[in-house]
Amino acid sequence: MLAYLETFGCQANERDSETIQGMLQQMGYEMTHEPSLAQLILFNTCSIREKAEQKVFSRLGTLKKLKEEKPGLIIGLCGCMAQEKDMIPQLRRRCPYVDLVIGTHRLHRLPAMIRNIQGGLGFQSDIAETCEIIEDLPAIRPFPFKALINITYGCNNFCTYCIVPYVRGRERSRSLEAILEESRRRVAEGALEIMYLGQNVNAYGRDLEDSRASFDRLLQEADKLDGLQRIRYMTSHPRDFKESMIDTIAASSKISHHFHLPVQSGSDTILQRMNRGYTRERYLELVHSIRNKIPNATLTTDIIVGFPGETEADFMDTLHLAETVVYDAAFTFMYSPRQGTPAASMPDQIPLKEKKERLHQLMETQAAISLKRHQAMQGQTVQVLAETYSSGILTGRSEGSQLVHFPGPENGAGKFYCVKITEPQTFLLKGEIL
Ligand code: SF4
């Protein structure tokens, strides 16, 4: 039996897809890259932006004919879209040939639901919200040298534009022991790098009775693991980034000096409307402290332009903040209303034309800053963990999480290299092995 799985969105979904593949393998499925050959097709979806959702609907649309030709084909939807309010009736109406909808809290039930469909029980859905964390589900790891490890699920922040708390539920932390045990196991299996995942990693442990469980503590314990060479994490919330964490990172030779601090806006008015919980000043203090304690830190961010009510002056505040911080890179987005979030019904929605103009201006400004930052690295040496190989070129990430391309051997992925930067570009660094 062959299964096709397509993953949309963030690393949390990528990690869930590892588990989905592990469960499918135990059921006897092999994975294929060709949907037309598969007996089971799953989409692990993202609902952070409307565009991502439209893409999934369009992909589902292309499967209608295939389903008519192969009535035994099972088509399923998992991930954040599955968890959205009213998604099941919408899917039943628009794509009645979808057989299975499984929510983000219920992944462990996937094999039973597939068996039910195979046994003729028809459409299956389970989107129940639970607080339970199921440990030790099987997983297939596409990159054995790189371990994605969940530390928290869900989010309590309710930023007014974001759908995550509604589709991923409230914040739930795994126990410190479970995370460290998984970390030890993955390192023993050959992982050189660990990426700890959560919607707000800095909040790790807040919901646990164990007073020892904090993100700081987790990093300190992971830092002691023999054989582990690099620790990364995603995503930080600037409000919860404590001074002690900067100290822990500064004192470690394994924890990446990359700080991804999503600012979203440089205007206090907009930050407040977004419910971000920090001011521009507080954010800049955090940046100052990081740069002060870790001079070689790389800083990246996420920025939304065109949030409801954003004036030209608010946008200028954002532009100036980007220039003040001098980010190495910024992921920039136009505000896209998500149904069910408070911002979607706020007054003063910004016209698309204006949003596009602001986005363009911000991207141009940031591109010039990124290029300058990268040019300053000409001739420097960085440590790169190569992840992929294609046509003579290895691609990996530096300790500052910059994308680096360099010529290398075909079997070179999964190893660290000292790379001298010879050709810095806006979005990547080119170099050669020393
Ligand atoms: S912190 Fe805000 S933006 Fe991030 S997942 Fe939580 S609600 Fe969404």
Image (tube, rainbow, N blue to C red):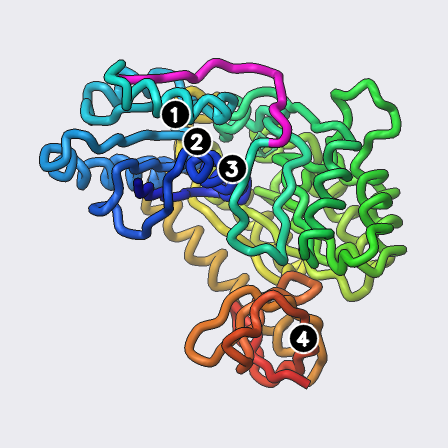
Distance CA(mark 2)–CA(mark 3) = 12 Å
| Mark 2, residue position | 79
Distance CA(mark 4)–CA(mark 1) = 41 Å
Image quarter where ligand 1 lies: top right
Residue 93: horizontal and vertical position, in percent?
A: 19, 19
Mark 1 element type: helix
Residue name at image x 65 percent, y 41 percent: 149
Q: Which mark is residue 417?
A: 4
- Say if mark 4 contacts mark 1, CB within 8 Å: no
Mark 2 element type: strand
The image shows residue 9, relative to residue 206, as above or below, that is below
Q: Amino acid at mark 3?
A: Thr
Neighbour class for label 1 at 10 Å: few (<14), some, many (≥20)? many
Neighbour class for label 3 at 10 Å: few (<14), some, many (≥20)? many
Write down the region rendered in magenta.
123-136
User: Which mark lies nearer to you, 4 or 1?
Assistant: 4
Can residue 347 be seen from the camera position used here? no
Residue 397 located left or right of residue 383: left
Q: Which mark is residue 19?
A: 3
Residue 158 versus residue 135: which sits nearer the camera? 135
| Mark 1, residue position | 82
- Say if mark 1 contacts mark 2, CB within 8 Å: yes
The image shows residue 84, relative to residue 190, as above or below, that is above
Distance CA(mark 4)–CA(mark 3) = 30 Å
Q: Which mark is residue 242?
A: none
Residue 215 located left or right of residue 135: right
Can residue 329 be seen from the camera position used here? yes
- Say if mark 4 contacts mark 3, CB within 8 Å: no
Residue name at image x 25 percent, y 46 percent: 35
